[in-house]
């Protein structure tokens, strides 16, 4: 039995992903910007991978749409170790 996905209102609280699919001719860079705003709008305790899967399924996203490509990148990158921060914070031991 498959795992239940989160509610679409939790996965896309501002409707940013939904609206990005409605914008004709939207670019990859514009989708990346929208994705960043979307990620920041998720609740702190939200599972971002689950949210990405939820919006992809709920909006029946075409695989070749720029937002689908950005979301796929988001799925691939979740769980990667963050890059080293610069400045004094990056050098602290």
Image (tube, rainbow, N blue to C red):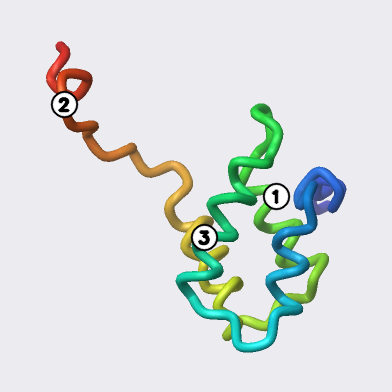
Mark 2 vs mark 3, CA separation in Å: 25 Å
Earlier sequence position, callout 2 versus callout 1: 1
Mark 3, Cα crowd under 10 Å, few <14 / some 14-19 / many 20+, is few
Q: Is residue 67 above or below residue 46?
A: below
- Residue for point 82% across, 65% down: 58
> Element type at marker 2?
helix
88 left or right, relative to 1 = left
Q: Residues within 10 Å of mark 1 (few under 14, many from 20)?
A: many
Q: Is mark 3 on a helix, strand or loop?
A: helix
Q: Which mark is residue 87?
A: 2
Image point 51% across, 56% down: which residue? 74
- The earlier-in-sequence mark between 3 and 1 is 3
Picture mark count: 3
- Residue at 77 percent across and 66 percent down: it is 18
The reply, left or right, for residue 31 in relation to residue 47 is: left
- Residue 21: x and y in percent read 71, 76
Q: Rounded to the nearest whole Å, what is the CA distance between mark 2 and mark 1?
A: 33 Å
Residue identified by numbered label 1 = 51
Which is nearer the N-term, disc 2 or disc 3? 3
Image coordinates of residue 90 in percent, x first then y, are 18, 24
In the image, residue 23 above or below residue 93: below
Q: Which of marks 2 and 1 is in front?
A: 2
Q: Nearer the viewer, residue 54 or 16?
A: 16
Quadrant into which the C terminus falls: top left
SS class, disc 1: helix
Query: Mark number for residue 33?
Result: 3
Question: In the image, residue 19 lies at what x, y percent?
Answer: 75, 69
What's the distance in space between the residues labelled 3 and 1, CA to CA? 17 Å
């Amino acid at each position: 039995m498959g795992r239940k996905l989160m509610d679409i209102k939790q996965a896309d609280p501002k409707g940013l992903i939904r609206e990005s699919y409605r914008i004709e001719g939207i670019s990859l860079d514009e989708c990346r910007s929208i994705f960043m705003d979307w990620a920041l709008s998720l609740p702190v305790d939200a599972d971002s991978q689950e949210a990405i899967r939820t919006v992809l399924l709920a909006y029946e996203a075409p695989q070749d749409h720029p937002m689908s490509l950005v979301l796929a990148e988001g799925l691939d990158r979740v769980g990667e170790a963050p890059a080293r921060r610069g400045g004094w914070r990056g050098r602290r031991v």
